Image (spheres, rainbow, N blue to C red):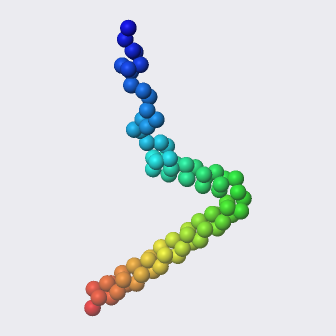
């Protein structure tokens, strides 16, 4: 009679595969999903987010207008130099 338990290895606790919590993609997805859920369900967070986005947008518009004005000034200087 042979012992069949001696031939099959005992199941080990550690399978060598990392768990979900050690996977950076899983953790990133969980954090992003949590933040999106928080913003979608919290009216105060929505107001703050929209206010912040509006400030960024206005800042970008102001910066763009400033850049346009500087370009027009430089263009005028080049034209003045060419006419001399």
Percent of width and height locating residue 47: 69, 63
At horizontal 36% and vertical 81% (from top left) the residue drawn is: 75
> Of 2 and 7, which appears nearest the observer?
2
Say if 14 sits above or below 59 in the image: above
Q: Is residue 77 visible?
A: yes
Say if 52 sits above or below 4 in the image: below
Q: Is residue 25 visible?
A: no
Q: Residue furthest top?
A: 1
From the viewer's perspective, is 34 left or right of 44?
A: left
Locate the N terminus by quadrant.
top left
At horizontal 65% and vertical 54% (from top left) the residue drawn is: 38
Q: Residue furthest bottom?
A: 84
Quarter of image, res 44? bottom right
At horizontal 58% and vertical 49% (from top left) the residue drawn is: 33
From the viewer's perspective, is 36 left or right of 19?
A: right
At horizontal 47% and vertical 42% (from top left) the residue drawn is: 19
> Of 56 and 79, which appears nearest the observer?
56
Percent of width and height locating residue 27: 50, 50
From the viewer's perspective, is 25 left or right of 53?
A: left
Percent of width and height locating residue 84: 27, 91
> Of 35 and 53, which appears nearest the observer?
35
Percent of width and height locating residue 52: 61, 68
């Amino acid at each position: 009679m042979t012992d069949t338990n001696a031939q099959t290895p005992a199941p080990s606790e550690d399978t060598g595969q990392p768990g979900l919590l050690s996977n950076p993609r899983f953790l990133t997805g969980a954090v992003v999903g949590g933040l999106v859920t928080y913003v979608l369900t919290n009216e105060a967070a929505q107001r703050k987010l929209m206010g912040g986005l509006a400030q960024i947008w206005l800042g970008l518009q102001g910066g763009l207008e400033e850049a346009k004005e500087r370009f027009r000034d430089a263009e005028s200087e080049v034209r003045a130099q060419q006419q001399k």
